[in-house]
Amino acid sequence: MNLLNDVKNLAVAYESEIIDIRRHIHAYPELAMNEKNTAAFVISKLQEYSIPFKTFKTHYGILADIKGKNPDKRTIALRADMDALPIKEMNDVPYRSVNEGIMHACGHDAHTAALLVAGKILNELNAHFEGTVRLIFQPSEEKYPGGATMMLADGALDNPAVQLIFGQHVMPTLEAGKVGVKAGKAMASTDEIFITVEGRGGHAATPDLLIDPVLIAAEIILALQKIVSRHSPPEIPSVLSFGKVMADGKTNIIPDNVCLEGTFRTFSEVWRAKAHKLITQMATHIAEAAGAKATVRIDRGYPFLVNDEKLTQRFKKQAASYLGSENVVDIDLRMTAEDFAYYSQQVPAVFYRLGTRNEAKGITSNIHTNTFDIDETALKDATGLLCWLALGELHA
């Protein structure tokens, strides 16, 4: 028996099914912590495939174990996320979102569809491997504190203990048919910053009688950029950006308060903690020097994501044997964040990128945009590769 050919043949045979599942999930997207119908659909497919599963009372996460011969020998996990984004879809496609203002603009529909059918294939081949493959269907990747924390708290990597985990994510800058990966530190930590500057507003024509929070907020934004340019260790990538400024005044009215919202991202827990202190100190001191007050709140988000070096090398060999070495590429460090990072802090993990771009078809939009879509020919590769990775690790 040639398992590689069997997996490839089954992935091709089930290609239309994978596409149908992805389109169904795409058409009925649900936001983080509201994935009720998506979870019900996943459960219906697991039941159809005769795969046992476990659900939870406090969230819509699902665990499903596929047992081969000697199931306690080794357990590896494959993870997919299920939630969508608050974006109004503008694609003119038959599977366009029917839930107004909600869209699968980050490819979680593709992740879930691929994992479901990978489970189907592995279940059909369970007489040909030893150990257990755990499928993790995770809610709420897009919203703090992240569904991964809930899944971990509920034993996603326990009973039996999971030795390693793989996760995949669509990448619209990479051509369909390819995958990309980076060993070691791969994605940044992420924190949300909220600053309120309290001054004294009034008529814009009498600035001498005011404590202008708009001007002070502007000074704070500019000054905080020095945290990255002058305080950050040069070998540690960092980003500090503000995307929201709320100053509810008028052309001739200075408001009493200004609110700032931003994000800080980096790759060191020591530097991360120091940067939080600097942000707070600089903002409060600048406001105090101007006679105002600044209140700073920093919500700690996901940790940085680490791809295990040895497992990444094995991943590249397995992916090359499945897709061809020319279709496995090294990618750069990314300042985006993912709650898969929590799994990577617990067991050896690899989070890799699935190419979904096809310029000839006009499929080029980035994730988190209202025209994002994927080249669906990538789905059979996504599904088959998940199976092949699992089989490779179990045989290893």
Image (cartoon, helix red, strand yellow):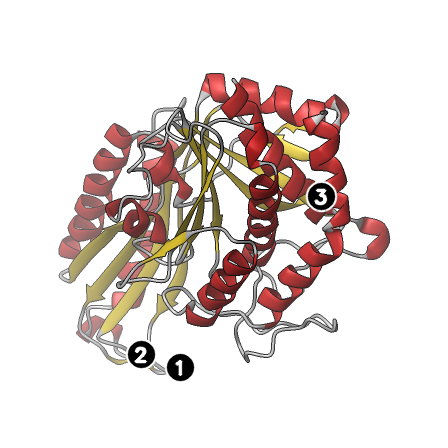
Instruction: Describe the element under mark 1 as helix, strand or loop.
Output: loop
CA gap between label 3 and label 1 equals 61 Å
Residue 112's x, y, as percent? 54, 54
Which mark sits nearer the N-terminus, 2 or 3?
Answer: 3
Residue 388 visible to an observer of this rendering: yes
The answer to whether residue 108 is above or below residue 264 is: below
Q: In this orientation, which residue lies closer to the viewer: 298 or 284?
A: 298
Left or right relative to 324: residue 212: left
Contact flag, marks 2 and 3 (Cβ < 8 Å): no
Which mark sits nearer the N-terminus, 1 or 2?
Answer: 2
The type of residue carrying mark 3 is Ala
The type of residue carrying mark 2 is Ala
* Residue shown at 63% from the left, 60% from the top: 22
Task: Determine which residue is flagged by label 1.
Answer: 251
Which mark sits nearer the N-terminus, 3 or 1?
Answer: 3
CA gap between label 1 and label 2 equals 8 Å
Left or right relative to 163: residue 365: right
Label 2 packing within 10 angstroms: few (<14), some (14-19), many (20+): some
* Residue shown at 53% from the left, 76% from the top: 101
Task: Determine which residue is flagged by label 3.
Answer: 11
Contact flag, marks 1 and 2 (Cβ < 8 Å): yes
Task: Determine which residue is flagged by label 2.
Answer: 204
Foreground disc of the pair 1, 2? 1
Residue 302's x, y, as percent? 33, 44
